[in-house]
Amino acid sequence: MADKETGFSAEEREAMKAAADDKKKARSRAKKTPEEVRAEGEADLKASLEKLSDTDREIAEGLNALVSEVAPELMPRTYYGMPAWAKDGKVLCFFQPASKFKTRYGTFGFEQPANLDDGTLWPTAYAVLALDAANRKFLAERLRLAVS
């Protein structure tokens, strides 16, 4: 529930703080090598995974493996404290755990740089309750399209 004084819930305030930290890190990484940026991003992403509940962590770890396999050019990082992967310095996709905002399911979402345009209507996020073989195959196809 939102705080009466600020209008933001504790989860929303935490996400805003995480976003500010992400921006600071992005500025500090501007002068680093791609290898250093990748290493720091992987460390941040892994730290974000450790904070997740068992189910969310299992899905997020599976998504990290999937992104690494299908789109190794994407840079791991965090986005509002959530696991994310970037292209050319901009978040392309991310996992919003169910526990983040106490929702029924986690979502794997795509941001503006994703090349998912299909006419005048297309999905940009998918509810993920499990990462079975069929779901991995479907999301792998979406990832390939997103990075193309």
Image (cartoon, rainbow, N blue to C red):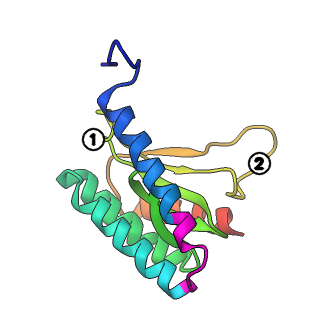
Q: Amino acid at mark 1?
A: Ser
Q: Nearer the viewer, residue 25 or 103?
A: 25
Q: Determine whether 28 is above or below 127 in the image.
A: below
**Secondary structure under the numbered disc 2 in the rendered image:** loop
The segment highlighted magenta reads: 26-34
Within 10 angstroms of label 2, few (less than 14), some, or many (20 or more) residues? few
User: Label 2, on which residue?
Assistant: 118
Q: Quadrant of the C terminus?
A: bottom right
Q: Residue 124 appears at what percent x and percent y?
A: 60, 45
Name the residue carrying label 1. 99
- Give the left or right position of residue 113, taking residue 131 as reference: right
* Badge nearest the viewer, 1 or 2: 1
Q: Is residue 98 magenta?
A: no
Image quadrant of residue 100? Answer: top left
At label 2, the amino acid type is: Asp
Q: Position of residue 130 (x, y in %)?
A: 32, 53
Q: Earlier in the sequence, mark 1 or mark 2?
A: 1
Dot 1: what SS? loop
Callouts 1 and 2 close, C-beta under 8 Å: no
Residue 2 vs 57, above or below: the answer is above
